[in-house]
Amino acid sequence: MHSSDKVVNELNRLLSYELAAMDQYFIHSEMYADWGLSKLAARIGHEFDDEKGHAQKLIARMLFLEGTPDMVTRHPINIGKDVPAMLQSDLDVEIAVGQALREAIAICETEKDYVTRDMLVSLLDDTEVDHEWWLRQQLGLIQKVGLENYIQSQM
């Protein structure tokens, strides 16, 4: 089923964010594991898996729409040097993804591609309600209990 080039272009733009988020979560998870922060490593590893699932949905939809997924282009990543910087850079990616999803949803509505729109709304819900919320919560905990106590709780 051929779709609007605008929709496929937006799906590729979103894919660049999801692939970058995967890369960033992957390295952050490995860094946490190396530092002995097993709880953070496991949770960020879960986020990596979620981003992979998002990328798979975008790719499957593009293929259905007879588009070509761009697996090369990546949104820039920011690897943190410590726990707060890593959590903040992950939050920054999720905020950017959320904004890109809202823009893509608007384009899908303009192009009358409501099936793609609904899929993107689901991804937006996951991005805002699960990923972004959890990262904000962790940064808030660091403020409330202090970095040392937070780090100890993640071992």
Image (cartoon, rainbow, N blue to C red):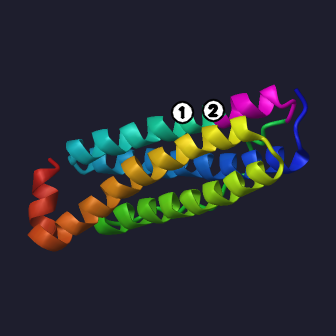
> Can you tell which mark lies on residue 72?
none
Looking at the rendered structure, the secondary structure element under dot 1 is helix
Q: Contact, CB < 8 Å: mark 1 with mark 2?
A: yes
Q: Quadrant of the N terminus?
A: top right
Q: Which residues are magenta?
A: 58-67
Residue type beneath disc 2 = Lys
Residue corresponding to mark 2: 57
Horizontal side of residue 85 vs 110, given as left or right? left
Q: Residues within 10 Å of mark 2 (few under 14, many from 20)?
A: some
Q: Considering depth in this image, is 33 or 105 the residue closer to the camera?
A: 105
Residue 65: percent from left, percent from top: 83, 31
How far apart are the alpha carbons under marks 1 and 2? Answer: 6 Å
Left/right placement of residue 55 relative to residue 36 reads: right
Q: Nearer the viewer, residue 141 or 123?
A: 123
Which residue is depicted at the point 75% across and 46% down? 12
Residue 128 location (% of width, % of height): 44, 54
Q: How many marks?
A: 2
Determine whether 107 is above or below 48 in the image: below
Residue in the picture at 21% in, 43% down? 39
Q: Amino acid at mark 1?
A: Gly
Q: Residue at x 68, y 60 (%)?
A: 103
5 with respect to 71 (left or right): right
10 Å neighbourhood of mark 1: few (<14), some, or many (≥20)?
A: some
Query: Which residue is depicted at the point 13% across and 71% down?
Result: 144
Residue that mark 1 sits on: 53
Secondary structure under badge 2? helix
